Image: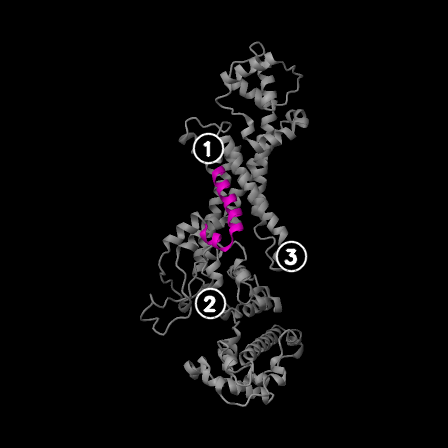
Amino acid sequence: MFQTALFIAIILSLIGFLYQFFFFIKGNRSFKGKKWVPRGLNIKTFFLNTIFQIKLFNAGKLRWLIHSLVASGFLYLLVFHALDDVTSFYWFQSYQSTVDPFQFLRNLAGFFVLAGCLGFLFRRLFFLKTLKKRKIHLKGLFSILLILMVILSGFLLEAVKIISEPVFMEMVEDYSDIDEDTGLEDLKIYWKKNYNVVFNEALLITQEKLDEGKQLNEEFCIDCHSPIKSAFISSSIALSLKKSGAWLNHHRADNYVYYAHYFLCLLILVSLPFSRLFHMFLIPVASLEKNLKKEQLVPGPNQDQFPDQYPSPGYINTATLYACTNCSFCSDVCSVFPNFLITENIHTLPHSKIDAFKRLFHPGQFDSETLYQLQSGNGDCTYCHKCTDICPSGIDLQNLWTLLNQKLVLKGFQDNYTFIKSLSLKQWAELEPEKEKIASTQKKTTQLADNVASFENCIQCTICTNVCPVVEHDLANNDYTPQQVMNLLRLGKKHMATGTRMVWNCLTCFTCNECCPQGIRVADIMIELRNNGNLRADAIKLEKMTNKKA
Protein backbone atom coordinates (compact mmCIF):
# COMPACT_ATOMS: atom_id res chain seq x y z
CA MET A 1 0.00 0.00 0.00
CA PHE A 2 2.76 2.44 0.96
CA GLN A 3 4.74 1.73 -2.19
CA THR A 4 1.63 2.29 -4.32
CA ALA A 5 0.92 5.58 -2.55
CA LEU A 6 4.53 6.67 -3.12
CA PHE A 7 4.35 5.89 -6.85
CA ILE A 8 1.08 7.80 -7.16
CA ALA A 9 2.57 10.80 -5.34
CA ILE A 10 5.65 10.77 -7.59
CA ILE A 11 3.48 10.58 -10.73
CA LEU A 12 1.28 13.47 -9.54
CA SER A 13 4.35 15.53 -8.69
CA LEU A 14 5.88 14.89 -12.13
CA ILE A 15 2.60 15.86 -13.78
CA GLY A 16 2.70 19.10 -11.78
CA PHE A 17 6.26 19.81 -12.90
CA LEU A 18 5.34 19.16 -16.53
CA TYR A 19 2.28 21.40 -16.25
CA GLN A 20 4.39 24.23 -14.85
CA PHE A 21 7.05 23.71 -17.52
CA PHE A 22 4.57 24.00 -20.40
CA PHE A 23 2.78 26.87 -18.66
CA PHE A 24 6.07 28.79 -18.47
CA ILE A 25 6.73 28.15 -22.17
CA LYS A 26 3.26 29.42 -23.03
CA GLY A 27 3.76 32.48 -20.84
CA ASN A 28 7.06 33.24 -22.52
CA ARG A 29 5.22 33.49 -25.84
CA SER A 30 2.51 35.82 -24.56
CA PHE A 31 4.13 38.95 -26.03
CA LYS A 32 3.53 38.76 -29.74
CA GLY A 33 6.39 39.75 -31.97
CA LYS A 34 8.87 39.85 -29.12
CA LYS A 35 11.93 37.68 -29.39
CA TRP A 36 14.30 36.57 -26.70
CA VAL A 37 17.77 38.06 -26.90
CA PRO A 38 20.52 36.33 -24.89
CA ARG A 39 21.75 38.51 -22.04
CA GLY A 40 24.55 36.23 -20.91
CA LEU A 41 24.80 33.89 -17.95
CA ASN A 42 25.68 34.99 -14.44
CA ILE A 43 27.46 31.83 -13.27
CA LYS A 44 28.91 33.31 -10.07
CA THR A 45 25.57 34.64 -8.85
CA PHE A 46 23.91 31.38 -9.85
CA PHE A 47 26.10 29.30 -7.54
CA LEU A 48 26.29 31.80 -4.68
CA ASN A 49 22.55 32.43 -4.65
CA THR A 50 21.55 28.81 -5.19
CA ILE A 51 23.80 27.26 -2.56
CA PHE A 52 24.35 30.05 -0.04
CA GLN A 53 21.42 32.42 -0.76
CA ILE A 54 23.87 35.33 -0.74
CA LYS A 55 21.24 37.81 -1.95
CA LEU A 56 18.98 36.94 0.97
CA PHE A 57 21.95 37.32 3.33
CA ASN A 58 22.60 40.82 1.98
CA ALA A 59 18.91 41.72 2.26
CA GLY A 60 18.27 40.48 5.80
CA LYS A 61 20.60 38.51 8.07
CA LEU A 62 17.86 37.20 10.40
CA ARG A 63 15.64 36.07 7.53
CA TRP A 64 18.68 34.37 5.97
CA LEU A 65 19.36 32.53 9.24
CA ILE A 66 15.75 31.33 9.53
CA HIS A 67 15.71 30.24 5.89
CA SER A 68 19.09 28.49 6.23
CA LEU A 69 17.92 26.56 9.29
CA VAL A 70 14.89 25.23 7.43
CA ALA A 71 16.76 24.54 4.17
CA SER A 72 19.81 22.82 5.70
CA GLY A 73 17.81 20.76 8.18
CA PHE A 74 15.20 19.67 5.65
CA LEU A 75 17.87 18.81 3.07
CA TYR A 76 19.70 16.60 5.58
CA LEU A 77 16.48 14.82 6.56
CA LEU A 78 15.59 14.29 2.92
CA VAL A 79 18.97 12.89 1.86
CA PHE A 80 20.08 10.93 4.92
CA HIS A 81 16.72 9.92 6.41
CA ALA A 82 13.92 9.84 3.85
CA LEU A 83 16.20 8.41 1.15
CA ASP A 84 18.37 6.32 3.46
CA ASP A 85 17.82 3.14 1.42
CA VAL A 86 19.61 4.69 -1.56
CA THR A 87 22.00 7.04 0.25
CA SER A 88 22.90 6.36 3.88
CA PHE A 89 22.94 2.55 3.65
CA TYR A 90 25.05 2.84 0.50
CA TRP A 91 27.49 5.47 1.82
CA PHE A 92 27.87 4.18 5.39
CA GLN A 93 28.26 0.44 6.02
CA SER A 94 27.38 0.80 9.71
CA TYR A 95 24.37 3.03 9.14
CA GLN A 96 21.34 2.51 11.36
CA SER A 97 18.82 5.24 12.03
CA THR A 98 18.94 4.51 15.78
CA VAL A 99 22.73 4.76 16.24
CA ASP A 100 24.89 7.82 16.69
CA PRO A 101 25.86 10.12 15.12
CA PHE A 102 22.83 9.61 12.84
CA GLN A 103 20.30 9.57 15.68
CA PHE A 104 21.70 12.81 17.09
CA LEU A 105 22.05 14.47 13.67
CA ARG A 106 18.46 13.59 12.77
CA ASN A 107 17.21 15.32 15.92
CA LEU A 108 19.54 18.25 15.33
CA ALA A 109 18.33 18.65 11.73
CA GLY A 110 14.73 18.39 12.91
CA PHE A 111 15.46 21.04 15.54
CA PHE A 112 16.86 23.34 12.83
CA VAL A 113 13.70 22.97 10.75
CA LEU A 114 11.48 23.38 13.81
CA ALA A 115 13.31 26.53 14.91
CA GLY A 116 13.17 27.95 11.38
CA CYS A 117 9.44 27.30 10.98
CA LEU A 118 8.67 28.79 14.38
CA GLY A 119 10.83 31.77 13.40
CA PHE A 120 8.77 32.23 10.24
CA LEU A 121 5.50 32.01 12.21
CA PHE A 122 6.72 34.34 14.96
CA ARG A 123 7.78 36.91 12.38
CA ARG A 124 4.34 36.71 10.74
CA LEU A 125 2.67 37.20 14.10
CA PHE A 126 4.99 40.06 15.07
CA PHE A 127 4.50 41.89 11.76
CA LEU A 128 0.91 40.73 11.25
CA LYS A 129 -0.47 44.26 10.91
CA THR A 130 2.08 45.22 8.23
CA LEU A 131 1.79 41.93 6.36
CA LYS A 132 -1.99 42.13 6.46
CA LYS A 133 -1.89 45.62 5.01
CA ARG A 134 0.33 44.33 2.21
CA LYS A 135 -1.97 41.32 1.75
CA ILE A 136 0.77 38.72 2.16
CA HIS A 137 0.05 37.45 5.68
CA LEU A 138 -1.29 34.16 4.28
CA LYS A 139 1.27 33.76 1.47
CA GLY A 140 3.33 30.59 1.90
CA LEU A 141 1.60 29.74 5.18
CA PHE A 142 0.49 26.36 3.83
CA SER A 143 4.08 25.33 3.06
CA ILE A 144 5.37 26.45 6.46
CA LEU A 145 2.63 24.64 8.35
CA LEU A 146 3.03 21.51 6.22
CA ILE A 147 6.78 21.34 6.90
CA LEU A 148 6.12 22.01 10.57
CA MET A 149 3.60 19.14 10.75
CA VAL A 150 6.05 16.78 9.02
CA ILE A 151 8.76 17.58 11.56
CA LEU A 152 6.46 17.40 14.59
CA SER A 153 4.94 14.11 13.40
CA GLY A 154 8.47 12.78 12.85
CA PHE A 155 9.49 13.64 16.41
CA LEU A 156 6.23 12.20 17.74
CA LEU A 157 6.73 9.00 15.72
CA GLU A 158 10.20 8.50 17.12
CA ALA A 159 8.92 9.22 20.64
CA VAL A 160 6.04 6.69 20.55
CA LYS A 161 8.40 4.10 19.08
CA ILE A 162 10.79 4.70 21.99
CA ILE A 163 8.11 3.88 24.57
CA SER A 164 6.40 1.17 22.50
CA GLU A 165 6.44 -2.36 23.96
CA PRO A 166 5.18 -3.89 20.67
CA VAL A 167 8.07 -2.31 18.78
CA PHE A 168 10.50 -3.63 21.39
CA MET A 169 9.10 -7.14 21.11
CA GLU A 170 9.28 -7.05 17.31
CA MET A 171 12.97 -6.13 17.49
CA VAL A 172 13.67 -8.91 20.01
CA GLU A 173 11.97 -11.49 17.79
CA ASP A 174 13.69 -10.31 14.59
CA TYR A 175 17.23 -9.73 15.83
CA SER A 176 17.82 -12.05 18.79
CA ASP A 177 17.02 -15.49 20.20
CA ILE A 178 16.10 -14.15 23.65
CA ASP A 179 12.91 -15.47 25.23
CA GLU A 180 11.35 -15.77 28.67
CA ASP A 181 13.80 -18.48 29.61
CA THR A 182 16.94 -16.66 28.42
CA GLY A 183 16.65 -13.30 30.16
CA LEU A 184 13.88 -11.44 28.34
CA GLU A 185 12.69 -9.95 31.61
CA ASP A 186 16.20 -8.70 32.40
CA LEU A 187 16.43 -7.03 29.00
CA LYS A 188 13.01 -5.43 29.54
CA ILE A 189 14.13 -4.05 32.90
CA TYR A 190 17.27 -2.59 31.32
CA TRP A 191 15.30 -0.98 28.46
CA LYS A 192 12.68 0.36 30.84
CA LYS A 193 15.41 1.98 32.90
CA ASN A 194 17.65 3.28 30.09
CA TYR A 195 15.44 3.51 27.00
CA ASN A 196 12.12 4.59 28.58
CA VAL A 197 10.12 1.68 27.13
CA VAL A 198 6.71 1.33 28.79
CA PHE A 199 5.73 -2.29 29.60
CA ASN A 200 2.28 -3.42 30.66
CA GLU A 201 3.57 -5.93 33.17
CA ALA A 202 5.04 -4.91 36.51
CA LEU A 203 8.81 -5.36 36.51
CA LEU A 204 10.86 -5.56 39.70
CA ILE A 205 14.07 -3.65 39.11
CA THR A 206 17.14 -4.96 40.92
CA GLN A 207 20.80 -4.28 40.34
CA GLU A 208 21.43 -7.90 39.44
CA LYS A 209 18.72 -7.90 36.76
CA LEU A 210 20.01 -4.56 35.41
CA ASP A 211 23.49 -6.01 35.05
CA GLU A 212 22.13 -9.05 33.25
CA GLY A 213 20.02 -6.85 31.01
CA LYS A 214 23.02 -4.65 30.23
CA GLN A 215 25.03 -7.71 29.17
CA LEU A 216 22.22 -8.86 26.87
CA ASN A 217 21.89 -5.36 25.45
CA GLU A 218 25.59 -5.24 24.63
CA GLU A 219 25.40 -8.65 23.01
CA PHE A 220 22.29 -8.13 20.86
CA CYS A 221 21.24 -4.46 20.78
CA ILE A 222 24.08 -1.98 21.25
CA ASP A 223 25.21 -2.19 17.60
CA CYS A 224 21.83 -0.85 16.43
CA HIS A 225 20.66 1.27 19.38
CA SER A 226 22.63 4.13 20.87
CA PRO A 227 21.51 5.68 24.17
CA ILE A 228 18.36 7.71 23.52
CA LYS A 229 19.73 10.80 25.25
CA SER A 230 21.35 11.77 21.95
CA ALA A 231 17.83 11.96 20.47
CA PHE A 232 17.37 14.97 22.70
CA ILE A 233 13.97 16.08 21.35
CA SER A 234 12.37 12.69 20.74
CA SER A 235 13.49 11.32 24.11
CA SER A 236 12.07 14.36 25.89
CA ILE A 237 8.72 13.85 24.16
CA ALA A 238 8.86 10.13 25.00
CA LEU A 239 9.44 10.94 28.66
CA SER A 240 6.37 13.20 28.69
CA LEU A 241 4.27 10.40 27.13
CA LYS A 242 5.20 7.66 29.62
CA LYS A 243 2.09 8.13 31.77
CA SER A 244 -0.14 7.40 28.78
CA GLY A 245 2.30 4.86 27.33
CA ALA A 246 0.20 1.77 28.16
CA TRP A 247 -2.83 3.20 26.33
CA LEU A 248 -0.71 4.29 23.35
CA ASN A 249 0.89 0.84 23.14
CA HIS A 250 -2.46 -0.90 23.38
CA HIS A 251 -3.81 1.06 20.41
CA ARG A 252 -0.51 0.85 18.46
CA ALA A 253 -0.20 4.61 18.26
CA ASP A 254 3.16 4.16 16.51
CA ASN A 255 1.35 2.79 13.43
CA TYR A 256 -1.15 5.64 13.26
CA VAL A 257 1.53 8.29 13.72
CA TYR A 258 3.58 6.58 11.00
CA TYR A 259 0.59 6.72 8.63
CA ALA A 260 0.15 10.44 9.36
CA HIS A 261 3.86 11.19 8.95
CA TYR A 262 4.07 9.25 5.70
CA PHE A 263 0.94 10.93 4.31
CA LEU A 264 2.28 14.42 5.17
CA CYS A 265 5.57 13.62 3.41
CA LEU A 266 3.67 12.50 0.31
CA LEU A 267 1.59 15.68 0.50
CA ILE A 268 4.75 17.76 0.34
CA LEU A 269 5.85 15.77 -2.71
CA VAL A 270 2.51 16.24 -4.49
CA SER A 271 2.18 19.95 -3.66
CA LEU A 272 5.81 20.76 -4.49
CA PRO A 273 5.18 22.16 -8.01
CA PHE A 274 2.30 24.36 -6.81
CA SER A 275 3.41 25.58 -3.38
CA ARG A 276 5.95 28.08 -2.09
CA LEU A 277 8.49 25.24 -2.01
CA PHE A 278 8.69 25.38 -5.81
CA HIS A 279 10.90 28.47 -5.51
CA MET A 280 13.79 26.11 -4.65
CA PHE A 281 13.90 25.17 -8.33
CA LEU A 282 13.07 28.63 -9.73
CA ILE A 283 15.52 30.82 -7.81
CA PRO A 284 18.46 29.19 -9.67
CA VAL A 285 16.67 29.97 -12.96
CA ALA A 286 16.17 33.62 -11.98
CA SER A 287 19.75 33.92 -10.71
CA LEU A 288 21.35 32.42 -13.80
CA GLU A 289 20.36 35.05 -16.38
CA LYS A 290 21.92 38.50 -16.20
CA ASN A 291 19.56 41.35 -15.43
CA LEU A 292 19.06 44.16 -17.91
CA LYS A 293 20.80 47.39 -17.03
CA LYS A 294 18.70 50.47 -16.36
CA GLU A 295 19.57 52.08 -19.69
CA GLN A 296 18.65 48.88 -21.53
CA LEU A 297 15.04 48.91 -20.38
CA VAL A 298 14.13 51.39 -23.11
CA PRO A 299 15.27 50.18 -26.57
CA GLY A 300 17.97 52.35 -28.06
CA PRO A 301 17.86 54.14 -31.41
CA ASN A 302 20.19 51.57 -32.99
CA GLN A 303 18.47 48.48 -31.66
CA ASP A 304 17.97 46.92 -35.09
CA GLN A 305 21.66 47.22 -35.97
CA PHE A 306 23.02 46.28 -32.50
CA PRO A 307 20.55 43.91 -30.81
CA ASP A 308 23.18 42.69 -28.31
CA GLN A 309 23.83 46.26 -27.16
CA TYR A 310 20.14 47.19 -27.07
CA PRO A 311 18.21 44.03 -26.15
CA SER A 312 14.47 44.27 -26.32
CA PRO A 313 12.78 44.30 -22.91
CA GLY A 314 9.79 42.59 -24.50
CA TYR A 315 10.70 39.13 -23.27
CA ILE A 316 10.22 37.51 -19.89
CA ASN A 317 11.14 34.12 -18.56
CA THR A 318 7.85 33.40 -16.82
CA ALA A 319 9.52 31.00 -14.41
CA THR A 320 11.29 33.93 -12.73
CA LEU A 321 7.92 35.39 -11.70
CA TYR A 322 7.21 32.31 -9.64
CA ALA A 323 10.62 32.52 -7.96
CA CYS A 324 9.10 35.34 -5.89
CA THR A 325 8.66 34.33 -2.25
CA ASN A 326 6.65 37.41 -1.22
CA CYS A 327 9.41 38.40 1.19
CA SER A 328 8.45 42.08 0.49
CA PHE A 329 12.05 43.29 0.75
CA CYS A 330 11.40 45.04 -2.57
CA SER A 331 8.45 46.92 -1.05
CA ASP A 332 10.51 47.94 2.00
CA VAL A 333 13.03 49.78 -0.20
CA CYS A 334 10.60 50.97 -2.89
CA SER A 335 11.13 54.65 -3.72
CA VAL A 336 7.39 55.20 -4.14
CA PHE A 337 6.37 53.45 -0.94
CA PRO A 338 5.13 56.86 0.36
CA ASN A 339 2.69 56.87 -2.58
CA PHE A 340 1.19 53.65 -1.24
CA LEU A 341 0.75 55.22 2.19
CA ILE A 342 -1.21 58.06 0.57
CA THR A 343 -3.20 56.27 -2.13
CA GLU A 344 -3.42 52.88 -0.36
CA ASN A 345 -3.22 51.29 -3.81
CA ILE A 346 -1.62 47.90 -3.03
CA HIS A 347 -0.49 47.59 -6.66
CA THR A 348 2.00 50.39 -6.08
CA LEU A 349 4.17 47.93 -4.15
CA PRO A 350 6.52 45.66 -6.15
CA HIS A 351 5.56 42.39 -4.45
CA SER A 352 1.89 42.98 -5.27
CA LYS A 353 2.69 43.83 -8.89
CA ILE A 354 4.57 40.53 -9.25
CA ASP A 355 1.56 38.64 -7.94
CA ALA A 356 -0.71 40.60 -10.28
CA PHE A 357 1.60 39.92 -13.23
CA LYS A 358 1.31 36.18 -12.59
CA ARG A 359 -2.47 36.45 -12.55
CA LEU A 360 -2.44 38.31 -15.88
CA PHE A 361 -1.41 35.05 -17.56
CA HIS A 362 -4.75 33.58 -16.51
CA PRO A 363 -7.64 35.16 -18.47
CA GLY A 364 -10.51 36.54 -16.40
CA GLN A 365 -8.49 37.02 -13.21
CA PHE A 366 -8.96 40.81 -13.22
CA ASP A 367 -11.87 43.15 -13.82
CA SER A 368 -11.37 46.54 -15.50
CA GLU A 369 -11.21 48.51 -12.26
CA THR A 370 -8.46 46.26 -10.85
CA LEU A 371 -6.47 46.60 -14.07
CA TYR A 372 -6.87 50.34 -13.78
CA GLN A 373 -5.49 50.21 -10.22
CA LEU A 374 -2.60 48.04 -11.43
CA GLN A 375 -1.75 50.48 -14.20
CA SER A 376 -1.96 53.40 -11.78
CA GLY A 377 0.34 51.68 -9.28
CA ASN A 378 2.86 50.60 -11.91
CA GLY A 379 2.81 54.12 -13.36
CA ASP A 380 4.23 55.42 -10.07
CA CYS A 381 7.44 53.39 -10.53
CA THR A 382 10.59 55.51 -10.88
CA TYR A 383 12.75 52.60 -12.16
CA CYS A 384 15.29 53.34 -9.44
CA HIS A 385 16.46 49.69 -9.52
CA LYS A 386 16.34 49.30 -5.72
CA CYS A 387 13.86 46.41 -5.87
CA THR A 388 16.00 44.48 -8.36
CA ASP A 389 19.16 45.10 -6.35
CA ILE A 390 17.67 43.71 -3.13
CA CYS A 391 15.53 40.86 -4.53
CA PRO A 392 16.76 37.65 -2.81
CA SER A 393 15.44 35.54 -5.69
CA GLY A 394 17.44 37.47 -8.30
CA ILE A 395 14.37 38.52 -10.33
CA ASP A 396 14.88 41.27 -12.92
CA LEU A 397 12.08 43.43 -11.53
CA GLN A 398 12.82 46.54 -13.61
CA ASN A 399 12.29 44.53 -16.77
CA LEU A 400 9.03 43.22 -15.32
CA TRP A 401 7.65 46.72 -14.77
CA THR A 402 8.47 47.66 -18.38
CA LEU A 403 6.77 44.50 -19.62
CA LEU A 404 3.81 45.08 -17.32
CA ASN A 405 3.29 48.48 -18.93
CA GLN A 406 3.37 46.82 -22.35
CA LYS A 407 0.87 44.16 -21.34
CA LEU A 408 -1.48 46.73 -19.81
CA VAL A 409 -1.28 48.89 -22.94
CA LEU A 410 -2.27 45.84 -25.00
CA LYS A 411 -5.31 45.57 -22.72
CA GLY A 412 -6.13 49.26 -23.27
CA PHE A 413 -4.64 50.72 -20.08
CA GLN A 414 -2.02 53.40 -20.77
CA ASP A 415 0.28 54.89 -18.17
CA ASN A 416 -0.51 58.48 -17.27
CA TYR A 417 2.57 59.93 -18.98
CA THR A 418 1.63 58.31 -22.30
CA PHE A 419 -2.03 59.20 -21.84
CA ILE A 420 -1.32 62.89 -21.21
CA LYS A 421 1.33 63.04 -23.92
CA SER A 422 -1.23 61.74 -26.43
CA LEU A 423 -3.40 64.82 -25.77
CA SER A 424 -2.75 68.41 -26.74
CA LEU A 425 -2.56 70.86 -23.88
CA LYS A 426 -5.91 72.28 -24.95
CA GLN A 427 -7.54 68.85 -24.96
CA TRP A 428 -6.09 68.10 -21.56
CA ALA A 429 -7.36 71.38 -20.12
CA GLU A 430 -10.85 70.76 -21.51
CA LEU A 431 -11.15 67.28 -19.98
CA GLU A 432 -12.83 67.77 -16.65
CA PRO A 433 -13.48 64.65 -14.53
CA GLU A 434 -16.17 64.56 -11.91
CA LYS A 435 -14.93 66.50 -8.89
CA GLU A 436 -15.88 63.84 -6.36
CA LYS A 437 -13.62 61.29 -8.08
CA ILE A 438 -10.52 63.23 -7.05
CA ALA A 439 -11.76 65.27 -4.09
CA SER A 440 -10.99 62.54 -1.57
CA THR A 441 -7.32 62.44 -2.57
CA GLN A 442 -6.72 66.12 -3.28
CA LYS A 443 -6.67 66.94 0.42
CA LYS A 444 -3.69 64.62 0.86
CA THR A 445 -1.33 66.74 -1.30
CA THR A 446 0.72 69.69 -0.05
CA GLN A 447 -1.40 72.22 -2.01
CA LEU A 448 1.54 74.48 -2.87
CA ALA A 449 0.02 75.04 -6.30
CA ASP A 450 -3.18 76.34 -4.66
CA ASN A 451 -1.36 78.69 -2.32
CA VAL A 452 -0.72 81.97 -4.14
CA ALA A 453 2.01 82.86 -1.66
CA SER A 454 4.05 79.90 -2.96
CA PHE A 455 4.62 81.43 -6.42
CA GLU A 456 3.34 85.04 -6.48
CA ASN A 457 6.85 86.44 -5.97
CA CYS A 458 8.05 84.93 -9.25
CA ILE A 459 9.51 87.77 -11.32
CA GLN A 460 9.99 85.68 -14.48
CA CYS A 461 13.75 86.14 -14.35
CA THR A 462 14.23 82.77 -16.16
CA ILE A 463 17.06 81.70 -13.84
CA CYS A 464 15.18 78.43 -13.13
CA THR A 465 14.96 77.85 -16.88
CA ASN A 466 18.62 78.63 -17.46
CA VAL A 467 19.80 76.08 -14.87
CA CYS A 468 17.28 73.37 -15.79
CA PRO A 469 19.02 70.29 -17.31
CA VAL A 470 15.77 69.20 -18.98
CA VAL A 471 15.50 72.48 -20.87
CA GLU A 472 19.15 72.36 -21.88
CA HIS A 473 19.28 68.76 -23.11
CA ASP A 474 15.69 67.96 -24.08
CA LEU A 475 14.13 71.20 -25.24
CA ALA A 476 12.45 69.54 -28.25
CA ASN A 477 10.27 67.37 -26.03
CA ASN A 478 9.10 70.27 -23.85
CA ASP A 479 6.40 72.82 -24.46
CA TYR A 480 6.81 75.10 -21.43
CA THR A 481 9.80 76.11 -19.34
CA PRO A 482 9.82 76.22 -15.51
CA GLN A 483 9.18 79.95 -15.26
CA GLN A 484 6.31 79.61 -17.78
CA VAL A 485 4.75 76.91 -15.60
CA MET A 486 4.96 79.32 -12.66
CA ASN A 487 3.28 81.94 -14.83
CA LEU A 488 0.42 79.55 -15.64
CA LEU A 489 -0.18 79.23 -11.91
CA ARG A 490 -0.16 83.00 -11.54
CA LEU A 491 -2.81 83.13 -14.29
CA GLY A 492 -4.93 80.58 -12.43
CA LYS A 493 -4.32 77.83 -15.01
CA LYS A 494 -3.39 75.07 -12.59
CA HIS A 495 -5.18 72.30 -14.52
CA MET A 496 -3.39 73.30 -17.70
CA ALA A 497 -0.06 73.33 -15.85
CA THR A 498 -0.54 69.71 -14.75
CA GLY A 499 -0.52 68.63 -18.41
CA THR A 500 2.63 70.45 -19.55
CA ARG A 501 5.55 68.34 -20.72
CA MET A 502 7.83 70.23 -18.34
CA VAL A 503 5.95 68.95 -15.32
CA TRP A 504 6.17 65.36 -16.54
CA ASN A 505 9.79 65.56 -17.75
CA CYS A 506 11.10 67.27 -14.60
CA LEU A 507 14.01 65.37 -13.06
CA THR A 508 13.36 66.85 -9.58
CA CYS A 509 17.04 67.67 -9.27
CA PHE A 510 16.05 70.75 -7.19
CA THR A 511 18.59 72.98 -8.97
CA CYS A 512 15.79 75.48 -9.61
CA ASN A 513 15.00 75.58 -5.89
CA GLU A 514 18.61 76.28 -5.02
CA CYS A 515 19.07 79.02 -7.62
CA CYS A 516 15.75 80.89 -7.39
CA PRO A 517 16.48 84.42 -6.05
CA GLN A 518 12.94 84.63 -4.66
CA GLY A 519 13.17 81.34 -2.77
CA ILE A 520 10.29 79.77 -4.70
CA ARG A 521 10.07 75.99 -4.31
CA VAL A 522 9.82 75.35 -8.04
CA ALA A 523 10.72 71.64 -7.96
CA ASP A 524 8.32 70.96 -5.09
CA ILE A 525 5.55 72.66 -7.03
CA MET A 526 6.44 70.55 -10.10
CA ILE A 527 6.15 67.36 -8.02
CA GLU A 528 2.78 68.46 -6.68
CA LEU A 529 1.53 69.36 -10.15
CA ARG A 530 2.59 65.94 -11.42
CA ASN A 531 0.80 64.25 -8.51
CA ASN A 532 -2.31 66.32 -9.22
CA GLY A 533 -1.98 65.42 -12.91
CA ASN A 534 -1.82 61.75 -11.95
CA LEU A 535 -4.97 62.09 -9.87
CA ARG A 536 -6.72 63.94 -12.67
CA ALA A 537 -5.63 61.43 -15.35
CA ASP A 538 -6.68 58.53 -13.12
CA ALA A 539 -10.08 60.11 -12.58
CA ILE A 540 -10.56 60.76 -16.31
CA LYS A 541 -9.61 57.21 -17.28
CA LEU A 542 -11.75 55.74 -14.51
CA GLU A 543 -14.69 57.87 -15.63
CA LYS A 544 -14.24 56.74 -19.24
CA MET A 545 -13.98 53.14 -18.15
CA THR A 546 -17.11 53.42 -16.01
CA ASN A 547 -19.08 55.05 -18.82
CA LYS A 548 -17.91 52.42 -21.28
CA LYS A 549 -18.89 49.64 -18.89
CA ALA A 550 -22.32 51.24 -18.35
Q: Nearer the viewer, mark 2 or mark 3?
A: 3
Residue at image point 54% right, 57% down: 328
**Is 58 part of what is drawn in magenta?**
yes
The Cα atoms of the two marked residues, 1 and 2, are separated by 48 Å
Q: Residues within 10 Å of mark 3 (few under 14, many from 20)?
A: few
Image quarter for residue 288? Answer: bottom left
**Is 191 part of what is drawn in magenta?**
no
The Cα atoms of the two marked residues, 2 and 3, are separated by 31 Å
The Cα atoms of the two marked residues, 1 and 3, are separated by 43 Å
Q: Which mark is residue 129?
A: 3
Q: Is residue 195 left or right of residue 470?
A: right
Q: In this picture, is 226 found above or below 22?
A: above
Q: At label 2, which amino acid type do we have?
A: Thr
Q: x%, y% of residue 258?
A: 57, 32
Residue at image point 61% right, 56% down: 131
Image quarter for residue 187? Answer: top right
Range covered by the magenta-colored residues: 53-77
Sequence-first disc among 1 and 3? 1
Name the dominant secondary structure of the magenta segment: helix
Q: Which mark is residue 84?
A: 1
What residue does disc 2 label? 402
Q: Which mark is residue 191?
A: none
Residue at image point 67% right, 16% down: 202
Sequence-first disc among 1 and 2? 1
Helix, strand or loop at label 2? It is helix
Numbered circles on residues, count: 3
Q: In this picture, is 237 found above or below 58?
A: above
Q: Residue furthest left?
A: 305
Q: x%, y% of residue 547?
A: 62, 76
The quarter in which the C terminus is drawn is bottom right
- Residue 333 visible within the image: yes
Q: In this picture, is 283 found above or below 424?
A: above
